[in-house]
Image (cartoon, grey):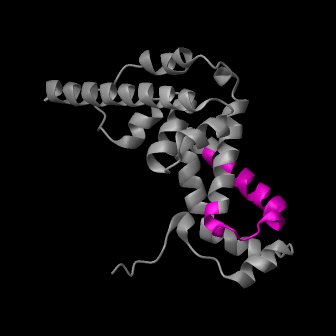
Amino acid sequence: MNDKPATGFAQDIDAMTLARAQRGDMAAFAQLYQRYARACFLLALRLTGQRQPAEDLVHEAFLKMMDTIGSYRGEAPFGAWFKRLTTNTAIDWLRRQRHLASSDTDALLEHAVGMDSDSSSVVDADSLLARLPPRARAIVVLHELEGYTHAELGVLFGQSESYSKSILARALKRLQALAASTVHASKVAL
């Protein structure tokens, strides 16, 4: 039996705090921020790969939440609803990036192909993900870590399901190559 308290977006929020927030109570919003800000930031960081945009997205997501919390009907846990709002906020940010306007999947991954691996770096998921272009990183994170389906990703990105599959397959292949070259480089350095 797991008695570990819920963390991240899985944390419960009491109905009274939620009702107060829906009425515009700033103290209730402060409680929501204290409870969900870290989860929001970590998801935004995984999706953007950059600290500053992730911090900006936290603020943007909470502002959107304040504007739309009245539409929350309780059909899903509040954390799941807010996680989706955060994800959509990050995807909107990705869409605003001019260098990602191209729908050509080869162009999306070309950025990562040209990057050299740093032989002194330690292989870890965050550093490898950061080396992918933003849209490819977002698809990897949302599919592999957050459990989104290809159909859901297609809708989120305004593309087909096969688009998501293609980006994911190429990104995972690139991640494997990056990991292998980093491990090889570190062995040679020894």
Q: Residue furthest bottom?
A: 16
Q: Quadrant of the C terminus?
A: top left
Secondary structure character of the magenta stretch overall: helix
Q: Quadrant of residue 178?
A: top left
Whether 64 is among the magenta residues is: yes
Along the line of sight, the residue nearer the viewer: 1 or 13: 1
The answer to whether residue 50 shows anywhere in this view is no
Q: Quadrant of the N terminus?
A: bottom left
The picture places residue 114, in percent across and down from the top left corner, at 44, 15
Magenta residues?
54-80
In the image shown, does 160 or 22 lie closer to the viewer? 160
Above or below, comparing residue 158 to residue 33 in the picture: above
Is residue 147 within the magenta segment? no
Image point (45%, 49%), residue name: 145
Residue 98 in view of the camera: yes
How many numbered discs, if any?
Answer: 0
Q: Which residue is found at the position 80% from the left and 79% from the top?
A: 20
Residue at the (62%, 29%) spot, across then down = 160
As drawn, the residue found furthest toward the left would be 190
Q: Position of residue 188 (x, y in %)?
A: 15, 24
- Residue at horizontal 53%, vertical 44%? 149
In the rendered view, tell whether residue 115 sits above or below residue 37: above
Place residue 161 in its image quadrant: top right
Q: Is residue 87 above or below residue 188?
A: below
Front-most of 65 and 105? 105
Give how far across and how far down residue 129 sits, in percent: 44, 36
Q: Is residue 10 left or right of residue 121?
A: right
Q: Position of residue 186 (x, y in %)?
A: 20, 30
